[in-house]
Image (cartoon, rainbow, N blue to C red):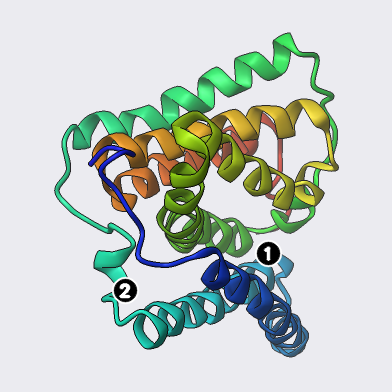
Amino acid sequence: MTASQESPLWTYEDLGLLLGAALPCLVISALSAKLLGLLVPQKGVVAALSQVILYAALLGCLRLILSWRRGLPFWDALHWRAPWPGMLLTGLLGPMLALTVGLLALLLGARKEAVAMDALLGDRWSVLAIGMAASTAGPVFEELVFRGFAQPLLVRSLGLAGGLLATALPFSLLHGPQYNWNWQRLLLLTLASAVFGLVRQQTGSTAASSLTHAAYNLTFLAGMIFQGDLIKKP
């Protein structure tokens, strides 16, 4: 389905309601992290579980918005469809995009510095938990919200290029603390996000962009692990 054919059955008011729900969901996630921290010693495991709780809470709010306010089936409304055209290509695109972004980071002179995630990858259980979240819950949540829910509104208002950029910018800025607000890395994340959005537009499926996104994340995580000794404890 192309941008010109797609007309979302929700409005910016619905998007505003989801944004308003973010604060209480963040509070729930933060409280969950505190409680989990009392029971689980691995910081990465706590971070991954609390992030999944945040995703679940926000998706629950989104489901209420779509079903109660608009009478829409959740997965179908957000274009979670499989199979889709070029499934193998969308899977291979993730690693290709990650390698391209890594090369561009070198060309742009992006600083090699410790980032927030490094402190969470100090043991095998943390690596496993974060890897699973980065390849499942994270991409699915972000694609459903950004490319499934927000992007159709923005593309309808701003056209394809404007909509992709308007979706990619906040996506990138939300990851700012993770990258110490390094402008080169955020610029490249904006580019990657726009590619995820383009996959969503070309295939008509958020499942497709989720696969590309998951493969992209896993490629970078593997690179972080093999580039340095991030796993410090057995």
| Residue drawn where x is 34% and y is 51% of the image | 206
Instruction: Residue 29: give x, y in percent of width and height.
Output: 68, 80
Q: Are marks 2 and 1 in contact (CB under 8 Å)?
A: no
Q: What residue is disc 2 on?
A: 74
In three-dimensional space, the C-alpha distance between marks 2 and 1, rounded to whole angstroms, equals 31 Å
Secondary structure of residue under mark 2: helix
In percent of width and height, residue 38 lies at 77, 89
Q: Nearer the viewer, residue 229 or 129?
A: 129
Q: Nearer the viewer, residue 46 or 207?
A: 207
Q: Earlier in the sequence, mark 2 or mark 1?
A: 1
Does 231 sit above or below residue 39? above
Quadrant of the rendered image containing residue 28? bottom right
Residue holding disc 1: 44
Return the x and y of residue 54 as percentages of the image width and height: 60, 75
Q: Is residue 186 above or below residue 80?
A: above
Residue at the (37%, 28%) spot, across then down: 93
Residue type highlighted by circle 1: Gly
Identify which residue is drawn at 64% across, 80% down. Answer: 21
